Amino acid sequence: AQSVTQLDSHVSVSEGTPVLLRCNYSSSYSPSLFWYVQHPNKGLQLLLKYTSAATLVKGINGFEAEFKKSETSFHLTKPSAHMSDAAEYFCVVSGYSSASKIIFGSGTRLSIRP
Amino acid sequence: NAGVTQTPKFRILKIGQSMTLQCTQDMNHNYMYWYRQDPGMGLKLIYYSVGAGITDKGEVPNGYNVSRSTTEDFPLRLELAAPSQTSVYFCASSPGRVANTGELFFGEGSRLTVL
């Protein structure tokens, strides 16, 4: 069985400071992991993906995530937050066993303070 | 580049009414999906399709129906609308299994309110 847990429902940081959004997963086999971003009243957009290649994955807009199998984590980071990063972020796990097994986390709302 | 297009963007329904949410994609993707998003929750899969003529239930199919007569279109039908169906609905597509192809492409959503 697969599952994904986003550990924080809301994260608030000051502009220019680092961002950390936490995600833990559970999977019976090697998963594919993704981070999606959703800006207000918009659809979801892929930030980055891990599909069993390099464990440190770089995405768009300066975001990156590290796959840590021993910790079953896939945390999203960015060195310096920008006002335009304010959005909802979803951690997603997908397995190979079924086309429908795409599990979304409950989301983390990122707020940026000026 | 249109991508995935959903209509309408907003709709208010009365209890017991029916309606269809339209979804079309121009990327020739075989896989299409309908999700609903409720406040504070992740997306829940309603129905999905792996190709024209093939549909299957997701996690929360009750109260909905779909059809896939063409590769491009994947309409979602709500019969006898209920307040519990108040939500934001997202259509998505992918060229194959997400685990293999790596990405879902989303429409901008349809916000439905049932009063």
Image (spheres, coloured by chain):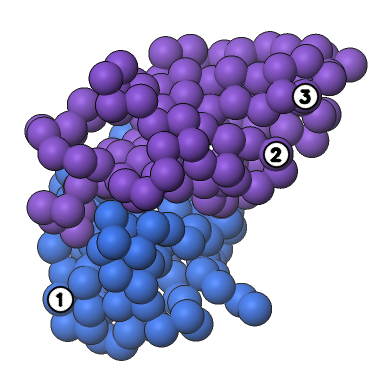
Res B54 label: 1
In the rendered image, the vertical position of residue A24 relative to residue B100, given as above or below? above
| Residue shown at 49% from the left, 82% from the top | B26
| Residue shown at 42% from the left, 13% from the top | A7
Res A62 label: 2
Determine the chain carrying the residue at label 3: A
Tell me where residue A20 sits by quadrant.
top right
Q: Colour of chain B?
A: blue
- The quadrant of the rendering that contains the C terminus of chain B is top left
Determine the chain carrying the residue at label 2: A
Q: Which residue is mark 3?
A: A80
- Are the residues flagged by discs 2 and 3 in contact, CB closer than 8 Å? yes
The alpha-carbon separation of the residues under discs 1 and 2 comes to 39 Å
Left or right position of B90 against B58: right
Q: Nearer the viewer, mark 1 or mark 2?
A: 2
The local secondary structure at tag 1 comes to strand
- Are the residues flagged by discs 1 and 2 in contact, CB closer than 8 Å? no
Instruction: Kindly identify the amino acid type of the residue bearing the numbered disc 1.
Output: Ile
In the rendered image, the vertical position of residue A85 relative to residue B14, given as above or below? above
Q: Nearer the viewer, mark 3 or mark 1?
A: 3
The image position of residue B21, as x and y in percent, is 42, 64
